[in-house]
Structure formats: structure tokens, C-alpha cells
Image: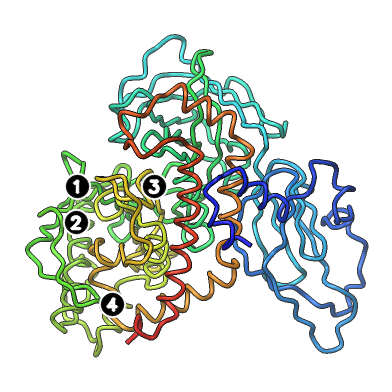
Amino acid sequence: MKRILCLFLCFWITVSLVACNRQASDGSPEETVLGTGATTENAPAQNENVTRPFAEITDNIFYMFEGELRLLNFSVHTPENAEGTVNWSSSNDCVIVEHGVVYAQREGYSIVSGGGESSCIVRVLPKTLPVLNLNVGGESITSKETYVDCTVSMTTSNEEYCFENAAAGIRLRGNSTLSKPKKPYRIKFDSKRNLLGMNEGAKCKSWVLLAEWFDASMIHNSTSLSLASEILTEYTSDWRYVNVYIDGIYQGVYLLAEQSQINENRVNIEEAGADTENILSGYFFEQENSSEDPFLTIDVQSYQYTNFLGESYVPHVRYFHFELKNDDTTPEQEAFAKRYFQNVFKAIHMATYENCYMAIDENGYLVPSDAKTAEEAIRALIDVDSLARKYIHSELTCNWDDRQKSYYTHVDFSEGGTGLFTFSCPWDFDHAFYRWKYYTYADTEEYFAACRNVWYVMLLNHDFIRERITEIWKEVYYGTNGFDSTLDMMLQITRNYEKDLRIDAEMWNRKEDLPEEVSDRITEVAKCYQWLLKRIAWLNEQFSDHNFVK
């Protein structure tokens, strides 16, 4: 059905057709095909000694709106001598689940199970935008470094997530958007708290408000982060749209998201510096070429590269800048982190282009490796699955920025860590799907990330990495039915939040920063939706083709 819908440019026709297939009426659960006895709390008692069929759920995390129905992606397994039917359950009454169909009953989240070991997180969005009130007492918010004291209040449909006058600080954040009238912000509460049930109730101090200035559709970040939740096993930020007021003055619609940081509920590694002075600890890196005083630089143009297509690659700048995101690191830890990061880069390049296999010792120095193959050497250095999953996501979204900024990696040498260079925490998708310079959508039938991001340029030269990419793609593509929940969500966001998003578009006239061909937000949503359908289909052909893995 969705492949037919892509022929229609008129967004409202698209929404109407999708809604007929995907969504129940706005009535009570009794008006749907579901009963009311499917949650953990009120499910009928079962004989624990009886073996029952169970469902293997292939969805990971997806978003729904209140009142929406959705069929899970699952398969039923019937052990020998099994009796009865699948025992569907949900962790709370946020959703009702029966026969594999989920009914989103109220704002929040729930963990859904089909009686087996697999489960799925369902995040339910409210149909009415939550309201975030910030009171700064008339103070101006003008700095990226200094917080202004404020109180924060939240109002939303689920009273559990409402609160008043929580003490916090607020400052500016971001780079390009800072020069624009609608400012992006970072909020830091005095004590840890959760917002709107995000990240399954995790409590943290730091949160961000994304202004979405350069995205006329206002769905690039939410769509990209939702895809990441379906693809990556590493941490990905949750998100919610909110109406924001500062000192009672309406600021428009923002995307509330999580701060990219080391935290037990976010990038869960030991933090060198804040947690320990040990050198062999955890480090969190960000590539940020806009940094004026970077933690470290790599002279990337001093190396030669070809990508897996056999094409020569020249980095767009001579030096790549990287930041260390840890707090309170010692000079010894910083020196180690610099050596380690630079030597990971060198070791990957040597294994790829020189057939020279190196390892990194406990002091961060390059030493000869015992590896006999490039695969052995590289697997000893990096988390291959994290690379493959983040590459798939980068290739799917065609994010213009991830070759130069907001690109995160980490390593954890502590007792609980893997000691592997890990690709994590996807972020910043204002310029995803289309080319930043010309504001034209990227070609749906060309490799993008594989030819632009230096990590992918190097590492995709290896057959074993491309083989792993194809395996993970098939797992995720078929496990999510072609990312259908994210595609649905794109349409439902505009359907449910259209009035608020239209007011924001009228309030913040972005025309001077957008190309002439961008006529209105709804048209941009339709273009983005259709582009993503085509991109998914093309990548599915490529990653299923023997030419990708030679």
C-alpha cells in the first residue's frame, strides 16, 4: 500500500489513505478489534506448567499515537506438546495488546511481550502537543557556556508526566542555528528527572530543545532518530515534540531530545575523569569540525584512500577536529585519549591499504599485532557490529553532516567495557536526506555515506564488514517490514500536529534560509516521505546484491 502512496504528492490524500489502513477510530478501546484483557495486570491466569506457543517479536522500538492500532512484526513458534495460544502482555496499560495487535491507549511507553524471550518497546505519543514552560525571570539567554537560572513546568495529557517549577538552568546550544531568530537550547535540571516518559522513564539532568530551523518539514530529526532506534543496538536519543513558552511568551514547536553524554541511561560507559583517574577507562569522542579549539586533530589529507567502489577519495578539509566529551579528565588521561584515537585511525588505515597489522598497547601506542589477516586486526580494534549498524543508518538517511560534525564514537577500557572503538549515538539530522549546499534531495540510487565519511571509506573495503552489513540489513529490513512504523509516524506527526507546526512556520518565517522550491511544510513532508521510500527500496536491492559483497 505504501509503495502506491508514494505516487501521490498531495499529502492529505496520503494521510487519509494510510489512516484508513493503519488507524482505528478515535473512540474507546471497546470500539476496536481488541479486547481489554491483554495487559500484564489483568491477563487471565495461566497454568505455569503448560508449555504455550510464543511469539518472536522482530520490532525493537517504535512510536505510535494515542488511539492508533498497529500489528507487530512477529512470528509464532509452537514447541512440541504446546497448548493454548500466545500469551501476549504489556508492562502497563499504556498499550493493550492482543493477537499481536497493539492499541495505543495513552501517552507513555510499554514493553510488549509474546510469551517468549523477545520483547518490543512501544512509545506512545500524545495527540495534543505537551507544553513546556520556562521561567527565566526576564533574563536574556545569550551564552553557550553560562546557564541562566530558571524554573521548568510541563503539561501534557498523561498527568504522571506533568510537573511545576522544577529548578534548572538554560543556555544556548548548537552552531549554525545560533545565528537564527529561533534559538536552540540546553536545559540542565538541578536534580535528575525524566521528561514525558522518554527513554523508558530514565532520569537525567541534561536535555535539549532543537529549533529545527533549517528543516522546512520539521521531521528530519524525529524520523532519523526513529530509524536509529530500529537499527542500532547502541544508545539512541528518544524525542518528543513540545510547544515551548519562555516567560509566558510562545516560542513555537521544538523537538525535545536527550543530551549526548556519558550516563548510565545514555552512553553507558565508565567516565574517565568524572568516575576515575585510571587511564584505562571510558572515553567519549565527537567529530566537530566547527570547533575552534579542538581536543585533537587528524591530518586526514596526509593519507591516501580509495572506497570499496575503487574510487579515489580526498577528504573535504585537511584536518578533522575531535572533541573529548568527558568531564574532569586528568592530563594523563587526555594524553592517552589523544594517542589512542589517532592510533586507531592509523591502524585501520594500515590494515586496509598497507596489509600491515597493528595493535594498540595499554599506553595507547601502536605495536605490531599477532593478527594474520586484516579481519583479525580490525576486529581486535573496533566493534564491527556498531560500525555496520551506524553505517546502514548513515547510508539510509544521507546525512550531510556526519562526515564532519556531530559524529560520535566511544571506547571503554574499564572492567565492564569491551575495549573496542565503538560507533554510537547518531545525532543532528537537520541536513539529512538532502544536500546542504543546494538544498536538493540526495540521489536515492547512489552510495552516499560510503563515499564521504572517512571511517566508512576505509572500512567498507573489507569483505567481512560488507558481509556483516548485508546480514544486519536483512535482519532489520525484514524485522521491521521495511521500516513501516517510522514511515507511518512521519505521516501521523503531520496529521496530529499540523495546526501547531503551521503556526510555528508562520511565526518563524524561514524563507530567507530555504530555497525557493520549498513552497510549504506539508509538501516537504510528502517529498521526504517519498524520497525515503525510494531510498529504502534501492538499499534493499544493493545490500541483497552479490555485487556489494564481492
Instruction: For marks 4 and 3, give the one nearer the viewer.
Output: 3
* Along the viewing direction, whichever of 329 and 486 lies nearer the viewer: 486
For residue 317, above or below residue 217? below
As helix, strand or loop, the secondary structure at mark 3 comes to loop
Q: Amino acid at mark 4?
A: Ile
Mark pair 1, 2: CA separation: 8 Å
> What residue would you read off at disc 2?
338
Q: Residue at point 74% right, 53% down?
A: 69
Q: Amino acid at mark 2?
A: Lys
Tell me the crowding category of disc 1: few under 14, some 14 to 19, or many 20 or more residues within 10 angstroms, Cα based: some
Q: Residue at point 38% right, 46% down?
A: 428
Residue most toward the top? 138
Q: Amino acid at mark 1?
A: Phe
Q: Earlier in the sequence, mark 1 or mark 4?
A: 1
Residue 162 in which image quadrant: top right
Mark pair 4, 3: CA separation: 29 Å
> What residue would you read off at disc 1?
295
> What residue would you read off at disc 3?
429
In the drawing, does residue 13 fall left or right of residue 426?
right
Q: Residue at point 41% right, 78% down?
A: 468
Asked whether the residues under the numbered discs 1 and 2 touch, taking CB atoms below 8 Å apart as contact, a structural biologist would say: yes
Instruction: For marks 1 and 3, give the one nearer the viewer.
Output: 3
